[in-house]
Image (tube, rainbow, N blue to C red):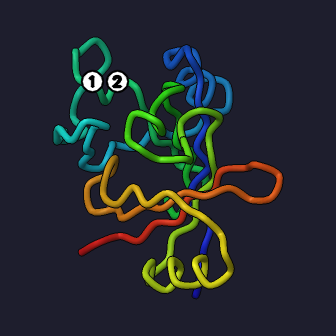
Amino acid sequence: MRLRLHHVNVVSDNIAELLAFYQDVLGLKQMPLPPMIDHVGHEGDGADGPGDEGWTDNVGFFEAAEDDQLQIHAGRRQAYLGPLMGHAVNPLLTGHFAFRTDDLDEVREELRAKGIPFSDYGEWAVKDWDQIFFTDPAGNVIEIHQVLR
């Protein structure tokens, strides 16, 4: 089971302020969004811009390394996302950090074998990303995802 850090997700109730901080204060380059799926299953192409009524105004991805392999994902806090979707873990309440793997089924098996409960979100936010979320003993939310091709 090979894991590599992929992104850190930060959340705020004021998304405009959060996006401006990472872009204007820290000088991080905002990336085009990949094809996205909103939390009720509507597909989006990631092309909605500021001022559009599209739900993608609630998120921004930033380059955190030169090779685009480490990212900051900034999004609007969604306090009730987990319960609304029937999951125990809510990745958009306090944020999370994420690992990418090439074999998410192996990760699922390892977690089950070790008695670690997880919420299996499947492909729910980013098109072609299969995602699971769980917490460490201190309550920090961890995502592990696999890119589906």
Question: Is residue 124 left or right of 144 when viewed as pictured?
Answer: left
Disc 1, SS: loop
Query: Is mark 1 in CB contact (under 8 Å) with mark 2?
Result: yes
Residue visible at 24% across and 48% down in the picture: 35
Mark carried by residue 68: none
Q: Say what amino acid the circle numbered 2 marks.
A: Asp
Pick the residue in front: 41 or 118. Answer: 118
Is 124 or 33 nearer to us in this picture?
124
In the image, what residue occupies the spot 52% across and 64% down? 69
Dot 2: few (<14), some (14–19), or many (≥20) neighbours within 10 Å?
some
Residue 68 % position (x, y): 49, 59
In the image, farthest residue toward the right = 138
Circle 2 — which element? helix
Q: Quadrant of the C terminus?
A: bottom left
With respect to residue 5, does 14 lie above or below? above
Q: Earlier in the sequence, mark 1 or mark 2?
A: 1
In percent of width and height, residue 30 lies at 46, 38
> In front: 135, or 128?
135
Give the labeled residue for mark 2.
57
Task: Please name the residue that numbered disc 1 is placed on.
Answer: 49
Which image quadrant for residue 143? bottom right
**Residue 17 at x, y percent in the picture:** 57, 15
- Comparing 72 with 144, the one in front is 144
Q: Amino acid at mark 1?
A: Gly
**The N terminus sits in image quarter:** bottom right
In the rendered view, would you say 56 is above or below 2? above
Where residue 5 appears, as percent x and y from the top left, is 62, 66
Label 1 – label 2 distance at C-alpha: 7 Å
Residue at (39% x, 33% y) in the render: 84
